[in-house]
């Protein structure tokens, strides 16, 4: 399984309550050069993530003590892990697992039984996009976007709304940044999927809807408008 990136530079944390799955995934990821750490549940996963600051975390959805959904929500609130990618493992095929995962701020999901080549390819693609995103942010000297009662700090990944700071999961943040980059422009669903998720990751239209809803709820923001049958836009109208 050849990688297209220098995998030796990256740390991956695997969180799953099944020992055989941890060993199986760790073996295959170390085989292609990744530095791998493991944890048996969500609580231990959060502790380990704080210790090693991984580049990517693979979380099982169903675990004792603390499941992957709750753990992901907590991880997304940790400043040091703002660039860390989160992938869910799910044995369930229902929409619920996938949508709940994206709702919690996950970047992608992989269904069990896991195919090592598919997982490695998915991880490589996500890490490539992560590096491009970080590089773009580092080269952007204008890192504060002000839009009336809304301020977006692209270096700290913080949104200030009515004086209150909000730390958003990476995909929600990128989606908001995209929509606000050109107020009044209607972004089609295809544009949003390409620019926020990229061609390397396959997600459905409902994923966009989930992230839009989260942005509206968290920021109490009515300036994100649905354009039926096309996509979304951010309006310049001042909102109290």
Image: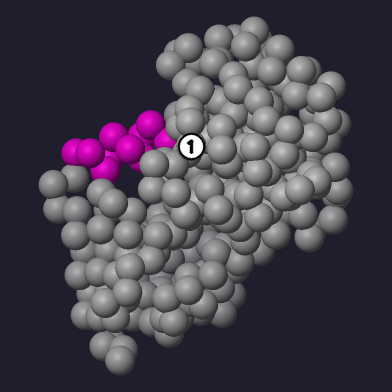
> Which one is in front, 234 or 80?
80
Q: Give the position of the N terminus as an image quadrant.
A: top right
- Residue 31 versus residue 173 in the image, above or below: above
**Rendered residue at 40%/60% (across/down):** 167
As helix, strand or loop, the secondary structure at mark 1 comes to helix
- Residue 140 versus residue 105 in the image, above or below: above
Q: Is residue 5 visible?
A: no
Side of 83 relative to 148 (left or right): right
**Stretch of the chain drawn in magenta:** 130-139
**Rendered residue at 66%/55% (across/down):** 70
**Rendered residue at 63%/49% (across/down):** 71
Side of 74 relative to 185 (left or right): right
Q: Is residue 51 visible?
A: yes
Q: Give the position of the C terminus as an image quadrant.
A: bottom left
Side of 155 relative to 25 (left or right): left
Q: Is residue 57 magenta?
A: no
Residue 177's x, y, as percent? Answer: 34, 60
Q: Is residue 137 magenta?
A: yes
Q: Residue furthest left?
A: 141
Number of marks drawn: 1
- How many residues crowd around disc 1 within 10 Å: few (fewer than 14), some, or many (20 or more)? few
Residue 147's x, y, as percent? Answer: 23, 74
> What's the magenta bit mostly, secondary-structure-wise?
helix
**Rendered residue at 82%/24% (across/down):** 19
Residue 171's x, y, as percent? Answer: 48, 53
Residue 234 falls in image quadrant: bottom left
Residue 206's x, y, as percent? Answer: 66, 63
**Residue ID for mark 1:** 50
- Residue 208 versus residue 141 in the image, above or below: below
The chosen color scheme is one colour
């Amino acid at each position: 399984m050849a990688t297209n990136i220098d995998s030796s530079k990256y740390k991956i944390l695997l969180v799953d309550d099944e020992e055989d799955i941890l060993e199986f995934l760790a073996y295959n990821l170390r085989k292609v050069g990744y530095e791998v750490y493991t944890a048996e549940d969500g609580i231990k996963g959060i502790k380990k993530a704080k210790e090693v600051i991984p580049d990517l975390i693979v979380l099982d959805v169903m675990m004792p003590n603390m499941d992957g959904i709750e753990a992901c929500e907590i991880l997304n609130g940790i400043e040091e892990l703002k660039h860390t990618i989160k992938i869910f493992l799910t044995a369930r095929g229902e929409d619920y697992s996938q949508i709940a995962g994206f709702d919690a701020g996950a970047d992608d999901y992989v269904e069990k039984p896991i195919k090592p080549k598919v997982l490695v390819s998915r991880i490589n693609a996500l890490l490539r996009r992560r590096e491009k995103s970080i590089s773009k942010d580092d080269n952007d000297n204008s890192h504060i976007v002000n839009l009336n009662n809304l301020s977006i700090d692209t270096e700290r990944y913080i949104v200030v709304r009515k004086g209150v700071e909000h730390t958003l999961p990476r995909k929600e943040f990128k989606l908001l940044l995209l929509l606000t980059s050109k107020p009044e422009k209607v972004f089609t669903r295809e544009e949003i999927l390409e620019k926020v998720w990229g061609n390397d990751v396959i997600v459905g239209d409902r994923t966009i809807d989930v992230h839009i809803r989260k942005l509206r709820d968290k920021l109490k923001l009515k300036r994100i408008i649905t354009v039926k049958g096309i996509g979304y836009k951010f309006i310049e109208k001042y909102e109290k």
